[in-house]
Image (cartoon, rainbow, N blue to C red):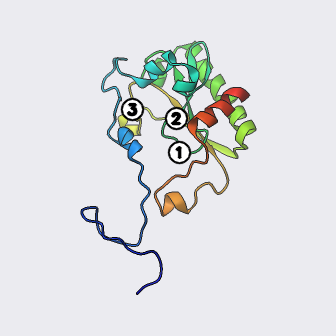
Amino acid sequence: MSEGPELVEQQGVGVQDAFQRLWTPHRMAYIKGQDKPDGDEDTGCPFCRIPSLDDKTGLIVARGETVFAVLNLYPYNPGHLMVVPYRHVADYTELTVEETREVAEFTQHAMKVIRAVSGAHGFNIGLNQGVIAGAGIAAHLHQHLVPRWGGDANFMPVIGQTKVLPQLLGETRDLLADAW
């Protein structure tokens, strides 16, 4: 008899091995593209719907005149937020001067807030323009701000293909919104 965890017979779920599984069925909505708009219309667009919600429900950190900051529902790291124009627009070149200015100002302010709240060492900041560039919701422009810390890429995502987030999104939203 071998030492270690007892292997349990699992019928129909793949090859039996010594790995334990972390199941995240809630992510299927993301994988299947549930509630993603499929065209240029704003009908069904989550970024058009979110501003109609209260801030806690919509995970909105701050609202401006032309843009808002919202936590990513499927974050890469704690504090991963997006700066999103209210207007349903797909391409960065289509932003007005006012929208462009406020995207930049919100990005700068978000960096300061996230550093103050969590001590982030750096950031990945970017726009995925179009489906081919990796945009999950290509029809509505959104800029990602992903906080990074030294050593934040550890064995969990590399070996376990799992991301450990130490805080609930609502708690993160409250911290960032209060500091904003």
Q: Quadrant of residue 48?
A: top left
Q: Is residue 180 visible?
A: no
Mark nearer the N terminus (3 vs 2): 2
Q: Say which element carries label 3.
A: loop
Front tag of 3 and 2:
2
Residue at 39%, 22% in the rendered image: 45
Q: Residues within 10 Å of mark 2 (few under 14, many from 20)?
A: many
Front label number (3 vs 1): 1
From the viewer's perspective, is residue 140 above or below residue 4? above
Left/right placement of residue 76 relative to residue 88 reads right
Callout 1 secondary element: loop
**Where is residue 124 drawn, in percent x and y?**
59, 42
Earlier residue among tags 3 and 1: 1
Residue situated in front as seen by the camera: 160 or 18: 18
Is the C terminus in the top left, top right, bottom left or bottom right quadrant?
Answer: top right
**Residue 32 appears at what percent x and percent y?**
32, 39
Q: From this view, report whether residue 118 is shown above or below residue 34.
A: below
Res. 64 mark: none
Q: CA distance from mark 1 to mark 2?
A: 8 Å
Residue 72's disc is 2
**Amino acid bearing label 2:** Asn
Judged from the image, the secondary structure of the residue bearing numbered disc 2 is loop
Calculate the distance from the C-alpha at mark 3 to the C-alpha at mark 2: 18 Å
Q: Describe residue 145's horizontal placement relative to residue 138 as left or right.
A: right
Do callouts 3 and 2 mark residues in contact (Cβ within 8 Å)?
no
Q: Which residue is mark 3?
A: 130
Report how far apart the C-alphas of labels 3 and 1 lie in the structure.
20 Å
- Which residue, as the protein is rendered here, is positioned at the far left? 12
Q: Which residue is mark 1?
A: 76
Structural crowding at the residue carrying mark 1, measured as other residues with C-alpha within 10 Å and reported as few (<14), some (14–19) or many (≥20): some
Q: Mark 1–mark 2 contact, CB under 8 Å?
A: yes
